[in-house]
Image (tube, helix red, strand yellow):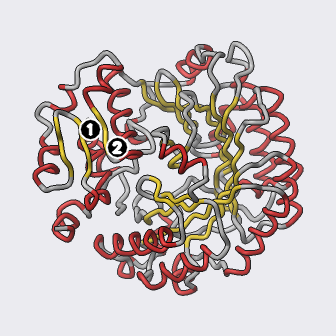
Amino acid sequence: MQSALIVKYGEERLPRYTSYPTSPCFTPDVDDSTYGDWLTAVPLEKAASLYVHIPFCRSMCWYCGCHTTITRGDRPIVDYLQMLREEICLVSARTKAPINIDHLHFGGGTPTIMGPKKLLGLIELLHEHFGFTDSTQIALEIDPRTLDQEMATVLGEAGIHRASVGVQTFDPVVQKAINRIQNIEQTMQAVSHLRRAGVDSINFDLVYGLPHQTVKSCIETTKAAIEMCPDRFAVFGYAHVPSFKKHQRLIDEVALADAESRIAQAEAIAENLLAAGYRRIGIDHFARPGDSLAIAQANGQLHRNFQGYTTDACETLIGFGASAIGRMAGGYVQNEIHPGRYAKRIVSGRLAITKGYRSSAEDRLRASVIERLMCDFQVDVPALAAVKGLESGALLDGNVRLAMLEADGVLENTGGVIRLREDGRFLIRAVAAAFDSYLLQSARNYSKTA
């Protein structure tokens, strides 16, 4: 039955549902004035999260789907960091008082490209404008090819709790095909630097569905990665969208796997991680049993945001930097994507927001339903609707896609209590899409993933 389901649903272009509605629905109707009002309304009794985007890399990995700028020199980075500092001041000036912070995440690009002193200075500035405690979780993305002991030491001094290390694949044939040469020794050295510096949690990112990748090479990469004993793994399917990311045109499309092969690669990685004692978290994360992510899943407290699965339950997420997305009680906001235009807005004294989305009560209900499906593989739609003071009929009545998935044996629907069958969990995003009222109008913008 699985092969038939792969044929029917496996080639669909569906979002990863790290938010709802997803970013293709954002419009200029939500502007910097809206954002300013939302910031002023942030409740001070509740903690928030911060995301800081550093969009620069030294070279382009052809598979990359992030908003990234390549620079050989440091001048663009220095100029950008000055704008970032000014944005932090602009945003914090709109809140009633310093907001307490539960989570801070540095993403990119390559966040460590700014160098040790600049990173410390940026964190110090955030401490000046927001409330940090010993329990604030700080995470940062790492390119192991460029991490040295000096930077790792600073990460420890700055209170970085978790480093997310980009591995992707150790197969040299695949690495050449994606323009990212990274040997096992470089990764081992980076992990050693981080642990010596006191960074107490390490995540590895792996990718399947890359050109020339096979089940065998996925298994070999996974086994080599397991030997380094990371606390977590995030396993993503490569999204080939050359019309959107022009550098992906350098990838040989003929060498890409079909949907069935991609799923086989993903499951091969999963089987080896499970055999090594990691627990499966949702669709694409794995964690050691004592990790906070595994504990949150066991307690029904797992969440999903733009970084994937998380323990972060904050309603407010403030994003800094070009392309950064924020989440507020009223909806979503996104900064200007292009670093140059982002800088012009900041220099003019304006918030960097250029688009967003104002969420309705029904949007928030659908977002909760989708999040619980993505985290728990089950959801009680009527119960969630009742909590929010809404009727569940808008989501369930006449839901043709949900009925089709039930008829195909992917899920069980008992009075609006949706449960995915064990062998249908690989289609969780297809199930989540049954509650996405915007999917048809924005499907062409979504990337193709397994």
Quick one: SS at disc 2?
helix
Instruction: Residue 268 in the image: state x and y as whole percent.
Output: 41, 75
Q: Is residue 277 above or below residue 436?
A: below
Check disc 1: other Cα within 10 Å, few if <14, some if 14-19, many if 20+: many
At label 1, which amino acid type do we have?
Phe
The residue carrying mark 1 is 435
Marks 1 and 2, the one that precedes in the sequence: 2
At label 2, which amino acid type do we have?
Leu
Quadrant where the N terminus lies?
A: bottom left
Q: Are marks 1 and 2 in contact (CB under 8 Å)?
A: yes
Report the side of 120 relative to 445 (left or right). right
The residue carrying mark 2 is 373
Report the side of 215 relative to 402 (left or right). right
x 35%, y 81%: residue: 254
- Please tell me in which quadrant of the rendered image residue 450 appears: bottom left
Residue 225 or 60: which is nearer the viewer?
A: 225
Mark 1 → mark 2, Cα distance in angstroms: 10 Å
